[in-house]
Each structure stands twice: as C-alpha cells, then as structure tokens.
Amino acid sequence: QVQLVESGGGLVQAGGSLRLSCAASGSIFRINAMGWYRQAPGKQRELVAVITSYNTNYADSVKGRFTISRDNAKNTVSLQMNRLKPEDTAVYYCNADLAVFGDSREYNYWGQGTQVTVSS
C-alpha cells in the first residue's frame, strides 16, 4: 500500500509564510512526478506546482511566491509558500505518479489534504 501524508497546513495572516511537506511511503520503486494541488470551496481542484527529475512548473498565480522541492532519498516533496494571500486559502493535496515494486506501471496517488487558511 502506498500512502501520501501531508503536514504543515494551518492559519496564517496575509503576507506570511507556511511550509507544506508530503511523505510517500510503501513499497515504492520509482517516483516520477510529485506535486501539489489545491481546492478552494466551490472551486475545482487546480495544480499549484509540480516537480520531476527534469523541471518544475508552477501555476501563474503562485510564481515567484511558492517554491517546490523534493528529496528523492526520502520520497518527500515540500512546498514553501511565501507572501501568502487570502485567495491562497484552500485544501492542499499532495500528488505523485509512482511505480511500486513488482509492477512497472505508474499510478497516480493523492494525499488526504491539509487546510491552509490565509486571513486578511
């Protein structure tokens, strides 16, 4: 069984910072992409940032404020969020494309989500 467990959400004032972390565990053979998505109330889930072995991509709304990083040895991905805005308020989900031992195919996994609330 593969699990993605997020941590680091919370309440912060506008202009502040938070750091989200996500740890993938289980019989993991290879992780391709890892990323963060978010879903605000009444809105669709949207990509925030994604990182592969070759590049990173960010939503336009977070470029210059958020930084995604990854520790391949620990199977973790982090999201440093600076200069937070009230519109960043959402549930943030960790996501990974990975293969487990014994199966070369990659599957997509989600974490349970962590709430980020930015007050004005």
Image (cartoon, helix red, strand yellow):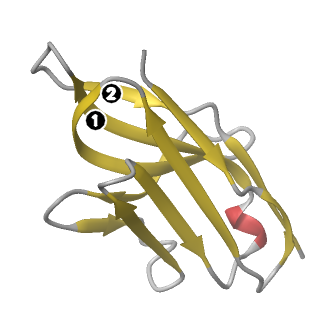
Q: Mark 2 points at which residue?
A: 108
Viewer-nearest residue: 109 or 119: 109
Kindly identify the residue that appears in the image at 71 percent across and 79 percent down. 17
Kindly identify the residue that appears in the image at 27 percent across and 67 percent down. 56
SS under mark 2? strand
Query: Crowdedness of circle 2 by 10 Å Cα count: few (<14), some, many (20+)?
Result: few
Mark 2 vs 1: CB contact within 8 A: yes
Is residue 34 in view from this perspective? yes
Q: Distance between the residues labelled 2 and 1?
A: 5 Å
Mark 2: which amino acid? Answer: Asn
Viewer-nearest residue: 99 or 41: 99
Q: Where is residue 25 in the image (x, y as percent from the top left)?
A: 44, 32
Is residue 44 in view from this perspective? no
Query: Crowdedness of circle 1 by 10 Å Cα count: few (<14), some, many (20+)?
Result: some
Q: Position of residue 16 (x, y in %)?
A: 77, 83
Q: Name the residue under label 1.
A: 97
Quarter holding the N terminus is top left
SS under mark 1? strand
Vertical order, 84 against 73 (above or below): below
Kindly identify the residue that appears in the image at 44 percent across and 79 percent down. 63
Vertical order, 25 against 41 (above or below): above
